[in-house]
Image (cartoon, grey):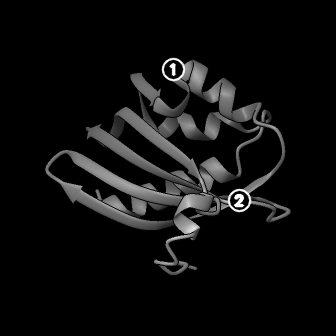
Amino acid sequence: MNTANFIMSFFKDLMSLTNENKEILRKYFDENANILWYETNEKFTLEEYLQVNSKYPDEWTGEIKRVEEKNDLIIFVGEVRPKDNSFCYYCTSFVKIKDNKILLLEEFWTKVSSPPEWRKKLKIGTPIF
């Protein structure tokens, strides 16, 4: 299995997910997979993950910014935006794979925002993008 291609394909299918095509993600997962969203303290089964992502409001676009692999652990960073480009999220994901199926997907989401006022007053740092 080419790890980068697997992750790119998974992420592309995730970005195009709708209620009508939610089954396209099933092929990536072990039937007993666990999905953890730490930001909202939620743990999902595969069925719940397919349901929640297919019901997500609005349309989204995204791209993988980085993929790293260490033994049976894949780490990737994705950039996700609504189609109107009004804001941006970054997701760092830790993925455990066995027999070309995701067993565990741990996701950490953050919304891109401006620095707090106290840090702006320090007049240090520069924008990344």
The residue shown at (41%, 23%) is 34
Which sits in the foreground, 7 or 126? 126
Amino acid at the residue labelled 2:
Arg
Report the front residue among 103 and 20: 103
- Estimate how packed mark 2 is, as few (under 14), some (14 to 19) or many (20 or more) residues with alpha carbons within 10 Å: some
Q: Position of residue 12 (x, y in %)?
A: 59, 57
> Real-space Cα distance between discs 1 and 2?
23 Å
In the picture of the structure, the residue carrying the numbered disc 2 is 81
Above or below residue 114? Residue 43 is: above
Residue 103 locus on image (x, y percent): 33, 30
Residue 24 vertical position relative to residue 68 in the rendered view, above or below: above
Instruction: State left or right for residue 111 relative to residue 20.
Output: left
The reply, left or right, for residue 89 in relation to residue 91 is right
Q: Is residue 79 visible?
A: no
For the N terminus, which image quadrant? bottom left
Q: Secondary structure at mark 1?
A: strand
Other residues around mark 1 within 10 Å, as few (<14) / some (14–19) / many (≥20): some
Q: Which residue is mark 1?
A: 44
Give how far across and how far down residue 17 sits, in percent.
70, 44
- Work out whether residue 4 or residue 66 is closer to the camera in this orientation and state it: 66
Q: Residue at x 78, y 33 (%)?
A: 19
- Quadrant including the C terminus: bottom right
Residue 100, image x, y percentages: 31, 43
